[in-house]
Amino acid sequence: MTTPVAVLQVPMPSRTVRLRLKLEAANRYGSVKVRTAQALLDSLVARGALRPGGHVVESTSGNLGIALAGLCRERGYRCTLMVDAATPSYSLTAMTELGADVVTVDAADPIHQIHARIDAVRAFRLDHPDTAWTDQYSNPAGPAVHAATTGPELLGPAALGQPDAVTIPVSTGGTLAGVIAHLRGHAPTVRVVAVDAVGSAATGKPLRPRPRKLPGFGSGLVSQLIRPDECDRVIHVTDDDAAHACRVIRARTGLSLGGSAGAAVTAATRLALDDPTISDIACLCPDGGDRYETTIYAAAAEPPTTVSDIGAITALHHAVLPQGGVFHAA
């Protein structure tokens, strides 16, 4: 399950900063969420809530649903996924082709789509009492798998030594919670930075409209799996700036990142600009650009929308991926 790491060199006025991009698109089903999905299913089986031939239900904005659909098909489970009008067409097609029953839930107010999806899951279970809910929002199996796998992997590759910091995009918070659990016990000097979306409630800020919301980045719910004070810093990035960073990185290096990965790299670059003691940052990149060809990569280039991101994205315009800069698992 170990995924490749692409190492970018980003020149700055006082030094060159190394960004280690952990490319989770190399996972099965194309994202970090396959780790979560596998752990959630295993936890249901372990406590007897999911039996052979059983029926799984979940609320999803995309990546977790794709992973659940694929794993359920492999294991012989029926899978019903609650999505909303903002779910990308790529994700809807993938979930359907992998055999899931996909239900689009309407929300009276688009800002509360996630609440409508979760309400739909609960209503579905009342009508289908034998259905098992993986519950990515509070199931501790999610953080546990990232403590066991993602956290240790972010400290590599071994040839580079330990990074100064890690940046982790937040949605439900399970990945971040697991990474924190591992690093606090095994690498306490590595700074942990949560990367949330401007307008997201995930790390406790007020929920606000996000007209160009990136799927899998931020949330309409306060995370039940993390506390912001467990992080060394929380950095908020707009959806537009995260998308702009993705386009810059692809133009400079050929790497095609997903939206939340663009946010992680933007936050890492901002962190390095703010703190000259930091020169080596690991960035979790949850998925790849193949899922965003008709959105992020089809959009016209626009300047950064947030003053604090202007410097970061300007620096990324000079990023280099050296020959031999991609490390693969042994």
Image (tube, helix red, strand yellow):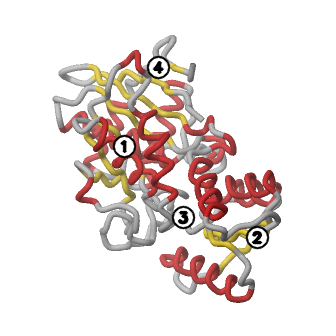
Q: Nearer the viewer, residue 271 or 64?
A: 64
Tell me the quarter of the picture where residue 256 sits. Answer: top right
Q: Which residue is mark 4?
A: 321
What residue appears at the point 83 percent right and 55 percent down from the top-left corner?
97
Is label 4 in a helix, a strand or a loop? loop
Q: Is residue 269 above or below residue 318?
A: below
The Cα–Cα distance between marks 1 and 3, rounded to whole angstroms, is 19 Å
Q: Which residue is mark 3?
A: 136
Q: Is residue 200 visible?
A: no
* Mark 1 or mark 4, earlier in chain: 1
User: At label 2, which amino acid type do we have?
Assistant: His
The Cα–Cα distance between marks 4 and 3, rounded to whole angstroms, is 35 Å
Tell me the quarter of the picture where residue 11 sits. Answer: top left
* Mark 2 or mark 1, earlier in chain: 2
Q: Which mark is residue 182?
A: 1
Q: Nearer the viewer, residue 55 or 96?
A: 55
Q: Are marks 1 and 3 in contact (CB under 8 Å)?
A: no
The Cα–Cα distance between marks 2 and 4, rounded to whole angstroms, is 45 Å
Coordinates of residue 145 in the picture (x, y in percent): 51, 49
Query: How packed is label 2: few (under 14 Cα within 10 Å), some, or many (20 or more)?
Result: many
Q: Nearer the viewer, mark 2 or mark 3?
A: 2
Q: Which residue is mark 2?
A: 55
Q: Nearer the viewer, mark 1 or mark 4?
A: 1
Is label 3 in a helix, a strand or a loop? loop
* Mark 2 or mark 4, earlier in chain: 2
The Cα–Cα distance between marks 2 and 1, rounded to whole angstroms, is 32 Å
User: At label 1, which amino acid type do we have?
Assistant: His
What residue appears at the point 56 percent right and 69 percent down from the top-left corner?
135
